[in-house]
Image (spheres, grey):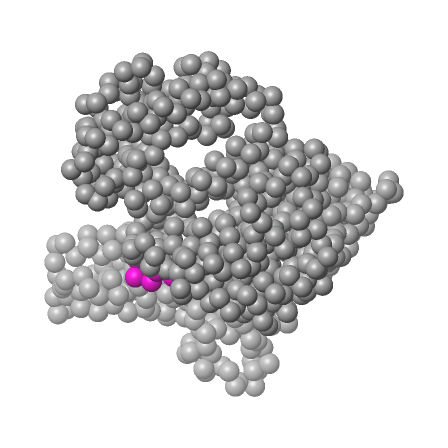
Amino acid sequence: MDTITIDSLIEKINEIDKRYDIGKIKRAYELADAAHEGQMRSSGEKYITHPLSVASILLDYHMDTDTICAALLHDVVEDTDTSLEDIRRQFGEDVALMVDGVTKIGQVPLNTKEEQQAENIRKILMAMSKDIRVIIIKLADRLHNMRTLYARPPHKQRKTSLETMNFYAPIAHRLGMSDVKEEMESIAIHYLDPYGCKEIERLLDVHKEERDSFIDHIIERIRSRITDIKPEPIIEGRVKSIFSIYKKMYVKNKPFDEIYDIYAVRIIVHSVIECYNVLGVIHDLFSPMPYRFKDYIATPKPNRYQSLHTTVIGKEGIPFEVQIRTVEMHNTAQYGIAAHWKYKAGLNGSVAGEQRFDWIRQLLERQQESDDVEQITDAIKTDLSQDEVYVFSPKGDVFALPNGANVIDFAYAIHTEIGNKMTGAKVGGRMVQFDYQVKTGDIIEIFTSGSPNYGPNRNWLDIAKTTGAKTKIRSWFKKERREENIVCGRDELEREFKRNGIQNTPELLEDTAHRARFDSVDDLYAAIGYGGVSMSKIIQRIKEAQSRAQKEQSQTLPTGDEITEATNRRSRQKGIIVEGVDNCLIKFAQCCNPLPGDPIIGFVTRGFGVSIHKQDCINVINNMDSAENKDRWIKASWAGVDDETYRATINIIAEQKSSIIADITAAIAINRISMNEMNMHRLKNGNTELIITIEIAGVEQLANLMLRLRKIPGVISVERTGKQ
Ligand code: MN
C-alpha cells in the first residue's frame, strides 16, 4: 500500500464530494503533524501516517468534515502537549468532544475474560461515547492498528488481537459494519492462531486456480441469464472470510470439504422485486440445497442486515452460497450505522427516517421528523446508562452499580474486606471524597489499611447507597464493635427518651429489651448501636405500653362526672398535643364532640386530665373569660393523622319512605364507617328524624359522608350535632 499523505487524502476527498471543508481538514492535519513531529510508528513510518490512515478509512464511510478532523487529531491530546482546550478553540466543540471520547475509550482497561464482562464492556464503550461517531472513529483507529500490527512485538500482537476479537469486532457487528468486523476478525485470528490459519490458507490455495475459474464460470452463467435487468446488476464472486471458515472448522468441527459457503457469489440489484426474480433464476440454473434458503429481506437481522441467502450446487458438484440484495441493503451491510452519515450527506440518495437498526429503531421512529444524529445518539446513551453505571477496577474488572452509587458502594462491591478496610479512593488517578458518585468509565482504585483494628466509619451507613454495602457495614459493627455499639446505643436511646418525654427507668429498659426479644439491655443497646433495630419502633412500643398503663390507671381512679364520661368513651390520649404538658390524660368534651381537624382548645379539669373542646363550643365561649376559669384554658392541637376514630353524631331529617333507612345505612357502610347508635322518630309534620352516632376518622371523612347522605333521594337535611 502506498504511503498516505495529506495530498493523497485531499485528492480522495475531492473525488468523493466537493462539499467537505478542505481548509478545516488541512488545519487539523497541520496541527497533528506539528504535534506528532519526531514520533515514529513501530513500522518505522512517521507517526502522522496513522491519523492520516484513520481519516482515510473514515472517508470510505463518507463521514463528515468534523469526524475527519477528529480522526486526524485523535492521538494528539494523549501523546503530545496539545490540550483539548486548544482543539476546542480551533475546531469547535464537536471535534473536541470526539477527540476526548476517543482518548477516554483508549484508557478503558480491557483485559477481561468472562462473557458477561465482555458484554458489559461493549455497553460501556457505547455509553461512554456521547456521540456515536466516537465509536466509529475508534473502530477505524483499531482497524488501522490491526492492519499495521505486523510491526509490533508478539505479546502486543496477541493482546491487541484478543481485545479486537472480544470487544471491537462485536461492536462493529452490532453497528452493522460488517466489512470492519470481518477484516478485524481475519487479522486477529492470524495472530491468535497462526497455525490454524495457515492450514486454511493452504487448503484454499490448493484449489486456487480451480476455484477462480469455477467462480468466473458461475458468474458468467448467471450474467447471461439476467441480461434483461436494467440497470445491470453487479455480480461479485469471492471466498468467504477466513474467520468464518475458521469458526466452522475449529469451533463447529466440520471438515473443509463440508463447508458449503467457502465460495460465495453476491448479486446487487436495484429493487426488492428484482431480488426475488434473480433468486428464481438462480434456483432454475443450479440445484438449491434444502433448508439453506434464508429470507433476511422479509425478516432482517437485528442489526438491520437484509439479503436473500441460498446455497446451490453447480454442475461440478461444489456448493456455493448466493447473496442477493439491493444497492441500499448492500450499503447497510457494509457500512452499518455509518451509512447514516453517508445518506445524510446526500451522496447516495436520501433515506431520511428509514429504520436501520433494531435497537435504535424505536428511537428513530420517535424522531422521524428530525433526522438529528445528536438526538439519536443522545437517546442511545440514555437508553444504555439510565439505571446502571459501569466502572472498572484498575485491573479491568467491570462492576455494574446502580446510578448514584459512590466509592463506598464500589469498594464493598469488590469485596467485603476491601470495603471494611477502605481508607480512601482514587478516580482517574485523583483522590476523591467517600461520597464521590461514580460515573460510567471511571477507573477506581481503592486504598486499604493493613491494620487489623481498622474498620468502616459509622457515617458510611448514611453515605452508602446500595443495600449490599449498608448490610455489610452494619454486620461489621455488629461483630467487631460490641462495646462501642453499646455506648452509642445507650446515648441514642437516652436522647430519644428525652425527646419524647419518656421517664427512663431500669424496669422500662428491661421490659423494652424483652419485648424486642433481646436477652439483655446491653443487647438492645448494641443493636441500636449498629443500626440493627429501628429506634422509632422501640419508642412507639414504649409509648403504647405507657398509654395502656395510663388507661388502666385512669379506670381505677375515683369517679367524678367528667371522669365517668371519659372512661365510658374510648380513651384518646393519642392524637392531641397539649402545649406544655406531656403524657397527660386527654378526654373529649361531650358538649361539642371535637373531631380531628376541628380547631380545639384544652381545659385543665379539677378532677383529672385535660378536656378538649371545639374552639367555637358554647361552653368555651361562655367560660373563656370567667375569673374562676380563665387560667385553665390551654392551647391544644391535633397531632397529624392516625388510625384512631372519633365519635360524631349526625341528625338527619328525611321524608317518610320505607327505603330511607336502608339507603342511609348503606351510605354509611359503603364509606366503611361503623355506626354505634341510631334513634328514629316521626316528626309532627310527617317527616322522619334520625339521630345517628358513628365512629369517624376525621372532619374530612365526616364531610364526605354528609355530602353523600344529602344526595339520597328523600333526605331533607343532614346536620352534625353536639350532644347537649
Ligand atoms: Mn490511534
Snapshot quadrant of residue 667: bottom left
Residue shown at the point (44%, 69%) measured from the top left: 597
Horizontal and vertical percent position of residue 179: 45, 40
Q: How many marks?
A: 0
346 relative to 424 in the view: left or right: left
202 relative to 704 in the view: left or right: right
Residue shown at the point (38%, 50%) measured from the top left: 339
Q: Is residue 439 something that shows in the picture?
A: no
Residue shown at the point (14%, 63%) measured from the top left: 714
Q: In the depicted view, which residue is nearer to us: 671 or 716?
A: 671
Horizontal and vertical percent position of residue 387: 51, 49
Give the position of the N terminus as an image quadrant. Answer: top right
Q: In the depicted view, which residue is nearer to us: 376 or 153?
A: 153
- Magenta highlight: main SS: loop
Q: In the depicted view, which residue is nearer to us: 710 or 248?
A: 248
Snapshot quadrant of residue 177: top left
Give the position of the C terminus as an image quadrant. Answer: bottom left
Q: Is residue 259 something that shows in the picture?
A: yes
Whether residue 714 is in magenta: the answer is no
Snapshot quadrant of residue 663: bottom left
Residue shown at the point (29%, 39%) measured from the top left: 234
Rendered view: 179 above or below 616 = above
Which residues make up the magenta segment? 366-373
Horizontal and vertical percent position of residue 378: 46, 57
Horizontal and vertical percent position of residue 159: 66, 35
Q: In the depicted view, which residue is nearer to us: 626 or 223?
A: 223
Rendered view: 266 above or below 483 = above
Rendered view: 186 above or below 533 = above
Whether residue 371 is in magenta: the answer is yes
